[in-house]
Structures are given as C-alpha cells and as structure tokens.
Image (cartoon, coloured by chain):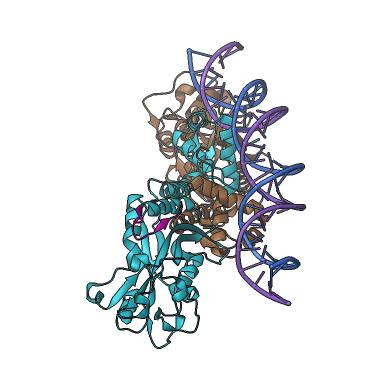
Chain colours: A brown, B cyan, C blue, D purple
DNA sequence: GGGTGTCCATAGGTAAATCCTATCAAAGTG
DNA sequence: CACTTTGATAGGATTTACCTATGGACACCC
C-alpha cells in the first residue's frame, strides 16, 4: 500500500463522477464499463486516503473531504491538460533550427541558406564560427546543424554532403603563376601563399593542396577572405579562394588575377553536419534537399545527389 | 495510439531525468531498473508527441521542445503533490460532524452532546429541527447525524439507540390527576392535553400513549416545551414532558405538579441516526459511545448498552 | 407489501501494461 | 584496440486494468 500511482484518467474519472453525480453515466461518457470506473474512483480514494463520494442507490453525495479536495484535483487535471495542449503540434511550433557555418562560407553562402530555409518553411538561426567551435557547440546542443567542410572525424557527428566547391587561385598582377598553362596544384608553393589564421579549415586545406610544403609567411595572416584578397592585391603572395567567395571587389581588379585550375582542380566538399542523435533529422534532411536546390549551378559547383 | 494515459510516476520520471541529466542515476534514485525508466520516459514522449531528451552515450541534452514543456510538466506534478498533501491526514482535518437534534431534546440535551463531543475530540456542529426536516437534511447530506426519537421508518437510515427517556406528567394544581394513585397511562385523555404543534414527534407520541383518544384542543398549541409548561400552569390541560425537559421553572412551581408514572411508565427511545452510507461511521459510533457515557444516570434514563 | 427497476459493488477471467534481468550497440578513453 | 559508460532492445514473469455477469440495497409502484 505504498504511495499508489495515479494517472490522469483516474482523476478525470473522479472529476466526471463528481460532475454527473452518477457512476453509470460517467462510465458511459468515458466509454468504459461501470465497474472499471468504480475501480478507478476507489483507487483514487485509496491513494488519497479519503472517501470522496458517498454512494447509494438513490442519492449521490460528495463528502465534505471530497468537496475540499475536488478543486485541487481539478487544478492538477487542468495543468495536465495545459501540458498536452502545449505539446500539441498546433501549439508547439518547432523551435528554430540553430545553424552554424564556417566563416569561409559565411556571407557568401548565408543568402542561399536563408532562401532554402524560407522555401522549405523551416525557421533557422545562423551563426558563424570556426569549425572547432561549431563542432563543440553542435555537441553541446547549442547548435542543431553546421555547414562545414567535410569529412569530419567526429564519431557522433553525421554529415550530409551538399556540394563540392572548387578552389580558385588568386595571384597578384605580374606573378609568375599569372600566365602558367596549364595551371595545376602542382605549381603551388606553400611558402608563397598568404593564408587565413589558424583554426580556419581553409588554411589547412590550402596547405595540403600545395605540392611544395614549406611554411607560409607567419607575418601576414588574414582573418577573413576579404582581407586576404587585399593582401594578395598588395603583392604579398597568392592564395586559394573557394568558388563562392571568388568575387573580386571592383577596386582590386587591376591588381589581381583570378585563375581557374586547368587540371586536377582542387576543391572542398561542403556538407551539413548534425549530431547523430538529433531527434528531428527529417527537418535537417529537408533543409539539405532545399539547399541543394538553391545552390547556384554556376561557378562549377558540383551538387551531390 | 489514442490519447495515451500518463501517470504521475511517469511525469516524475521525466522530471528526475531532466534534473539529473542521466537515465541510470534517475532510475536508481526512483528505485526502478533503467529499462523501466526508459520506457516511462518514452511513454511520456509518445503521449506528448514530442521528443524531450536527446540521448547519447556521452552527452545528455534536453531538446528545445523539452525545455519549453518541462515547466508545464513540473507544474502538473506540483499540483498533484498539492493534492496529495492536502489529502494527507496531517493537513486534512476531518470536517465537523454536522449533527441535528429534535427541539424536545434541544436545549436539554445539547450540553451533554457538546461534552461528549469535546471528550471524544470530535468537532461537531449542532442544529435543531423537527424530525421531518432532520431526516430530509440527513438524506441530502446537509447533516451527518441526527438525534431523534427512534425507531425511524426510513430504509436508508441507520439508528444507534442511546437511551430510553421516560415521560413525566405535568398537571395543573388542583387537577384530578394530581392525586390519582397509582398513575398509569390508562388515565390519560387526549382531549384534555395541551401539546406541541404538528411535526413534533412528542405530540404524536403523547397522543398515542393516551387511552382515550379524542382530539386535543386545537386552540392551544405550543412550539416549545417551555411554553407548554406555561400553558399547563395556566390550567389549560396537562401534558407529557420528557424526563430531561422536566425541570419546572421556579415561577411555575406553585401552579403545576410533576408526576412520575407508577406503572407502565411511557417513554421514548432516543437514538443517533445516520445514513447507512455515511463513510466514517466510526466517528459516529465513538460519538455514540461518548454520549452514553455522558448521559446523566438520574431521571431514570435507561442507557442502552 | 411483494414485484420491479435503478444503482453501485463484487467476482472471475482475460487482455494489456509494467517491471525485471540479460544483452546489445554506440561512442569516448587510455 | 580493448575497456568503460550509457541508453535501447529482447524476452519472460508479474501486476494491473478491463470486461461481463451477478449480487445486494433501496426506492417506487401498483
């Protein structure tokens, strides 16, 4: 006879009996048999240690104790109802998907992301962080998804590939590489490059693409691709730009040359990553589908089926 | 998959899991096995149609939906707790027993009733009404018990006999019956009596005790025994007084004579009556026991074991 | 006043939910 | 790569809940 477990149907039964003042009709109204209802009511009475109703064949009475407890019982019932109502799909609009993206996608891909989300009627929030922070926030639940350069080594993260983004070479006017034909990654020398700061995946990718390794100048380091373009324009070296970020600001056009690779064009694969345990993967999947649809076909972007 | 029934243990499980951020420890704390707890939680999630927690082996996350619903869930839980607390014997003092008594016991027996209730630590309320009203209020639940002249014809009413109360004869000075020896009910003539108004059981009892029936004067009718004593003192006739009410006010003592019957002394039986369905008959029973103890032994009252 | 109807409780059997132990699968750690 | 941690799954036993059928109490009605 330990603290007996009450369910909301039990309370509902008591409430209805009190309202209708009749076990039989209450049972009928609840769609159960009268003995079952009687059992529920007496279960509540046992749980409370209080007789709520005085049953008799002719007259139905609510005991004084019952009259005092019924409002509390109904309050509990109301709150249960609130809970169910709040959880109802009509009420509980899905929370915005919190999406992060790496800075080298940032401003260049955000419009696409917003269009795709809008078209698929998915509320999103966007934040921009380097990969490591994104992954940590993803795992801490501060983000639901992140647009990253994949693959990702983490076991608990699932990636949906979206597209391959080719790299372009940005060289200063007059540089040897300006005229090299055909242009291939074999011609790249890490020590002649200007790069983003540590922590940007693009930096590591650029380095690993180079045939000649060596270390790039630690003297000149950019924290954004736009700055990087200016460094190249200033003649400090050349760099790789992701295709989506390869627009050259008007003022720089006489001082730099943007070249496409002729062979073995290097690229990075962009994917949307989530925790494997994320409950509504479906939403992420449909966002991914929308992203594929909204990703522009120019710039040699290869969308991954 | 109709609206699934949630119990408070289910909600409690969810609450504790959210608090401890750990299924295993929550299960241990609840004293159940971990798989059982998992089942409870996913039952709640199914009932709400919402995933509350994002489980993984390493990290525990509350979903955005979960964070929004948990306060509501806890509110429902709190109200359930309120209900149980309010029903707890420590909190829920038993409601006062609502007791009615007939006017011919009224002021004469009320002190005894109050003493008995006080001694047995039973809160009571007292009201005075004629028998018919008492019975109706008893059946409507407005009263829990009534002190009546029994037996009572109603099927749904149970009576506990308390004592037999003899009747005395109150005669005006100089009346023939003042000196009749021996005095027995055979000498009574209904048409010479002054009586209480219709509805008082004492009236009917007095009439039925008389050997000569006939109708009493409809001209003189009292609504209280005290008035009746004055009517007798005024020489309007004689009457029967219940022993407990047979005290003669000082001012009347030269004008009336109170006589005991010598043979076949008429009496009425006083009992405490309740609905048979009254939940806590125990309280009425102990009140009855206390009443027997507190009923005075003088006046020839015969207490019924 | 005995038959009749109403109403809730009880009994007994079956279906369903619940709980347990044992085991599995995933993921992080040394 | 073995080991640990954590929650899900599987399978069997127990408990609970529900149904139909029946009983007992009481009021009502000829």
Is the stretch drawn in magenta largely helix, strand or loop?
loop
Q: Quadrant of residue D2?
A: top right
In depth, the one of B279 and B262 nearer the eye is B262
Q: Is residue B147 above or below residue A244?
A: below
Residue A268 visible, this orientation? no
In depth, the one of D11 and B67 nearer the eye is D11
Residue drawn at (45%, 69%), measured in percent from left and top?
B134
Q: Is residue A219 above or below residue B268?
A: above
Q: Quadrant of the C terminus of chain A?
A: top right
In the visual, does B256 lie left or right of D15?
left
Q: Magenta span covers which residues? A: B294-305
Q: Residue lying at the far front in this picture: please name it.
A: B181
Q: Is residue B249 above or below residue B48?
A: below
Measured as percent of width and height from the top left, residue D25 is found at: 62, 58
Measured as percent of width and height from the top left, residue A64 is found at: 44, 58
In depth, the one of B190 and C26 nearer the eye is B190
Q: Is residue A116 above or below residue B27?
A: below
In depth, the one of A225 and B81 nearer the eye is B81
Q: Quadrant of residue A157?
A: top right
Magenta-drawn stretch contains A293: no
């Amino acid at each position: 006879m330990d603290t007996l477990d009450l369910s909301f149907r039990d309370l509902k039964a008591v409430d209805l009996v009190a309202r209708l003042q009749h076990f039989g009709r209450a049972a009928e109204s609840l769609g159960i048999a009268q003995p079952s209802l009687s059992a529920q009511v007496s279960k509540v009475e046992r749980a409370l240690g209080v007789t709520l109703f005085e049953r008799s064949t002719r007259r139905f009475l609510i005991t004084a104790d019952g009259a005092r407890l019924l409002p509390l019982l109904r309050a509990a019932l109301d709150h249960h109802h609130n809970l169910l109502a709040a959880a109802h799909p009509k009420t509980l609009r899905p929370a915005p998907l919190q999406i992060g993206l790496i800075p080298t996608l940032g401003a260049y891909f955000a419009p696409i992301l917003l269009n795709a989300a809008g078209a698929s009627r998915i509320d999103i929030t966007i934040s921009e962080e380097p990969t490591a922070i994104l992954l940590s926030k993803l795992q801490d639940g501060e983000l639901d998804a992140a647009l990253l350069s994949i693959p990702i080594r983490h076991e608990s993260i699932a990636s949906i590939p979206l597209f391959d983004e080719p790299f372009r070479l940005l060289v200063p006017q007059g540089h040897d590489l300006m005229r090299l034909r055909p242009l291939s990654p074999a011609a790249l020398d890490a020590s002649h490059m200007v790069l983003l700061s540590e922590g940007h995946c693009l930096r590591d990718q650029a380095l690993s693409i180079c045939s000649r390794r060596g270390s790039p100048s630690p003297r000149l380091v950019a924290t954004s691709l736009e700055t990087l373009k200016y460094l190249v324009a200033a003649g400090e070296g050349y760099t790789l730009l992701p295709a989506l970020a390869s627009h050259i600001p008007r003022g720089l056009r006489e001082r730099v040359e943007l070249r496409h690779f002729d062979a073995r064009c290097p690229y990075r694969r962009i994917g949307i990553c989530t925790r494997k345990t994320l409950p509504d993967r479906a939403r992420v999947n449909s966002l991914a589908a929308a992203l594929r649809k909204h990703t522009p076909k120019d710039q040699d972007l290869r969308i991954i089926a």
